[in-house]
Amino acid sequence: MSDEPRPVQAPAPETSPDTSPDPARVPASRPPPVQGTLESVLYAQDLDAAEDFWTRVMGLAAFQRQPGRHVFFRVADGPPVQVLLVFNPDATSTPPAPDVPLPVPPHGAHGPGHYCLAVSAARLDDWRSHLTALGIPIEAEIEWPRGGRSIYLRDPAGNSVELADPALWS
């Protein structure tokens, strides 16, 4: 008798395929409604530069900061409240330690992201003037075919920041 492993034979394929729907793909019910976007996330390794940009240039209020990990900004008081979370991806891309009180799952991204703030059409020229006065380069201005206009710029981390007339999605 040989000590070599014996090959295992795969079962023969079924002759008539099962055509019933996969229960994992059939929704049990319709999803409940959502209220809107609560949090949006960008990533930046230099959180001091991010905080300066989002407060001084963009006028958002920082309301929470953990050095080396994140800085959070209030965008709108809602309802629902809307916040921009800026994380250092080096600090959030690994799983949390088992003993942390808030074990948020790991997340992170490298490379430029995109974030758009709604601005009334009547204030876009004011934004262009504000950015120009601060020496912030405007990367692009777009008149959208269906209406609305956008101004694009970059934050210090290289993320694309868009200021847009909400009419572009009307």
Image (tube, rainbow, N blue to C red):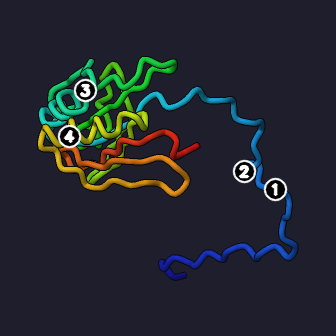
Under mark 1, the amino acid is: Pro
CB atoms of marks 2 and 4 within 8 Å:
no
Q: Position of residue 88 (x, y in %)?
A: 22, 39
- Camera-side residue of 4 and 34: 34
Mark positioned earlier in the residue sequence (2 or 3):
2
- Which residue is at a point 58% across and 43% down the rendered structure image? 170
Vertical placement of 64 versus 126: above or below?
A: above
Which residue matches tag 4? 131
Distance (Cα) linking label 1 and label 2:
8 Å
Distance (Cα) linking label 2 and label 3:
45 Å
Camera sees residue 21: yes
Which mark is drawn over residue 59? 3
Under mark 4, the amino acid is: Leu
The quarter of the rendered structure image containing the N terminus is: bottom right
- Which residue is at a point 36% across and 34% down the rendered structure image? 123
In this rendering, which labeled residue sits more in front, label 2 or label 3? Answer: 3
Mark positioned earlier in the residue sequence (4 or 1):
1
- Which residue is at a point 71% across and 48% down the rendered structure image? 24
Under mark 2, the amino acid is: Arg
For label 2, count other residues whose C-alpha is less than 10 Å away and answer few (under 14), some (14-19) or many (20+). Answer: few
Q: Residue furthest bottom?
A: 2
- Camera-side residue of 132 and 139: 132
CB atoms of marks 1 and 2 within 8 Å:
yes
Q: Position of residue 25 (x, y in %)?
A: 72, 51
Under mark 3, the amino acid is: Gly
Q: Quadrant of residue 58?
A: top left
CB atoms of marks 4 and 1 within 8 Å:
no
- Camera-side residue of 96 and 112: 112
Q: Position of residue 92 (x, y in %)?
A: 28, 38
In this rendering, which labeled residue sits more in front, label 3 or label 4? Answer: 4
In this rendering, which labeled residue sits more in front, label 4 or label 1? Answer: 4
